[in-house]
């Protein structure tokens, strides 16, 4: 009988591990998901208030996210991502009314900073020099301890970039994680910075094709099957308890625990995990975007941070949104739409809307919390961890989640 690997959690970390392990063969892959849907934070659902399918949140990929693009190629969904042909990012400053588009050149030498038509308005080439300090910062430092968080380049480029990537006020964020983002994107050049969006939805792009591929490869997906506890032997997990449905593990069976840190900690004794989190607020409006609107627009000096244009829908993302999680929903929707209407020229009347607030969207990307992220391997030889909260060397992103699943699959493969 082939050994079985039980993957606990059908978010992107669990699904990427399952895709890798099912491709390798030699093991039966069983995915257990506690809820009725796969995808975790990266999912789509039909919203009754809007009468249409929306994403739980807005997630951006970049052309340099090699693990995510490889995953999409494997599941046959790479062409479902759309974006501009070059690395371009449009911005508007709500306070001044200025609009501009950053245009990065493809190579690693940043020729774009010498072109006033491509760089941040009101800046000179020399203003970008301090960013180099973030490439290889001292260990354990926050961004605010490495660079001065002030000036036009910071406010109009570094701050929005790191706020979106780290989901924390950048001066408090881990310089190690900020450096990883910059080294894999801006430092590589425009070929790694082209923005990519799942225009048809996260579910149809990242989740449903993976589930279809796993079914084709003979993997088993068990929804609404929540792991309650595990029994441990001397050096391995021996039994999985799913309420009335318990599974005794054979000698060669293995477990990938791909659940959030606050779910993993009670299941694994003495497991150090991040304990602080940051919120993300998303707003969705059922309205046709203006024809000339870019697919993604950064907004400065506003509540709104990023506006996304989808067919028949405009969506907004606000990172580090803890200050907004208790704001009355309709008040928040009106505030956000007032800014969107001002920026886009759409009517001021509030269209059908939905607010999605995730209180624990990501771990707090501070140096202290980053230091609490465990690796994939555990003290039990057949138990492996996955999730964007594990030590991927990246912030809690789609790319980090998929890399964690790939790493977990590599550890499991070595057990054979």
Image (spheres, rainbow, N blue to C red):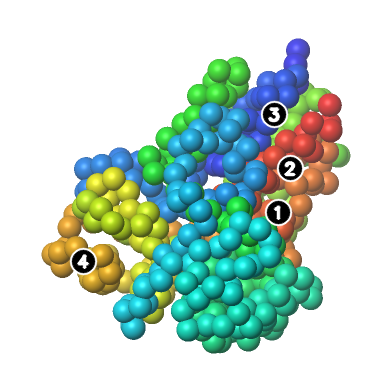
| Residue 282 percent location from the top left of the image | 37, 59
Tell which tag, 4 or 2, sits nearer the viewer: 4
Q: Is residue 131 left or right of residue 54?
A: right
Mark 2 — residue? 407
Q: CA distance from mark 3 to mark 1?
A: 19 Å
**Crowd around label 3: few <14 · some 14–19 · many ≥20 (10 Å):** many
Q: Are marks 2 and 1 in contact (CB under 8 Å)?
A: yes
Q: Are marks 2 and 3 in contact (CB under 8 Å)?
A: no
Q: Are marks 4 and 3 in contact (CB under 8 Å)?
A: no
- Sequence-wise, which precedes: disc 1 or disc 4? 4
Q: Secondary structure at mark 2?
A: helix
Mark 3 — residue? 21
- Sequence-wise, which precedes: disc 4 or disc 2? 4
Of residues 53 and 220, which is closer to you in this image?
53
Q: CA distance from mark 4 to mark 2?
A: 46 Å
- Sequence-wise, which precedes: disc 3 or disc 1? 3
Mark 4 — residue? 345
Q: Is residue 61 left or right of residue 402?
A: left
- Sequence-wise, which precedes: disc 2 or disc 3? 3
Residue at horizontal 31 percent and vertical 71 percent from the top: 327
Tell which tag, 4 or 3, sits nearer the viewer: 4
| Residue 224 percent location from the top left of the image | 48, 33
Mark 1 — residue? 392
Which quadrant holds residue 277?
A: bottom right
Q: CA distance from mark 2 to mark 1?
A: 9 Å
Q: CA distance from mark 1 to mark 4?
A: 41 Å
**Crowd around label 2: few <14 · some 14–19 · many ≥20 (10 Å):** many
Q: Are marks 1 and 4 in contact (CB under 8 Å)?
A: no
**Crowd around label 4: few <14 · some 14–19 · many ≥20 (10 Å):** few
């Amino acid at each position: 009988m082939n050994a079985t690997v039980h993957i606990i959690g059908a978010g992107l970390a669990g699904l990427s591990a399952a895709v890798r392990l099912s491709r390798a063969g030699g093991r039966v892959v069983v995915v257990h998901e506690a809820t009725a849907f796969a995808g975790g934070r990266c999912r789509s659902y039909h919203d009754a208030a809007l009468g249409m399918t929306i994403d739980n949140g807005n997630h951006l990929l970049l052309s340099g996210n090699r693990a995510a693009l490889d995953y999409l190629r494997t599941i046959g969904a790479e062409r479902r991502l759309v974006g501009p042909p070059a690395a371009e990012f449009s911005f508007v400053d709500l306070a001044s009314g200025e609009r501009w588009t950053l245009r990065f050149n493809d190579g690693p030498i940043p020729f774009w900073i010498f072109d006033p038509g491509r760089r941040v308005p009101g800046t000179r080439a020399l203003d970008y020099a301090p960013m180099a300090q973030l490439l290889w910062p001292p260990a354990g430092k926050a961004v605010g301890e490495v660079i001065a968080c002030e000036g036009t380049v910071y406010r109009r480029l570094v701050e929005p970039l790191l706020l979106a990537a780290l989901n924390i006020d950048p001066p408090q964020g881990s310089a190690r994680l900020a450096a990883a983002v910059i080294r894999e994107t801006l430092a590589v050049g425009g070929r790694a910075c082209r923005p990519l969006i799942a225009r048809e939805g996260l579910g149809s792009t990242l989740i449903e094709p993976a589930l279809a591929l796993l079914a084709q490869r003979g993997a088993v997906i068990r929804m609404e099957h929540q792991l309650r506890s595990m029994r441990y032997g001397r050096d391995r997990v021996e039994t999985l308890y799913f309420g009335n449905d318990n599974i005794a593990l054979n000698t060669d069976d293995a477990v990938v625990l791909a659940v959030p840190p606050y779910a993993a900690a009670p299941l694994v004794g003495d497991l150090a995990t991040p304990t602080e989190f940051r919120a993300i607020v998303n707003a969705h409006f059922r309205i046709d975007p203006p024809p000339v609107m870019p697919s993604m627009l950064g907004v400065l000096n506003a509540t709104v941070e990023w506006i996304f244009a989808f067919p028949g829908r405009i969506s907004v993302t606000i990172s580090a949104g803890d200050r907004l999680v208790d704001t009355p929903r309709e008040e928040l929707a009106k505030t956000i739409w007032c800014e969107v209407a001002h920026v886009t020229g759409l009517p001021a009347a509030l269209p059908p809307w939905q607010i999605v607030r995730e209180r624990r969207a990501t771990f707090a990307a501070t140096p202290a919390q980053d230091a609490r992220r465990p690796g994939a391997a555990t003290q039990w030889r057949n138990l492996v961890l996955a999730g964007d909260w594990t030590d991927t060397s990246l912030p809690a992103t789609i790319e980090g989640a998929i890399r964690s699943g790939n790493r977990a699959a590599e550890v499991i493969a070595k057990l054979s």
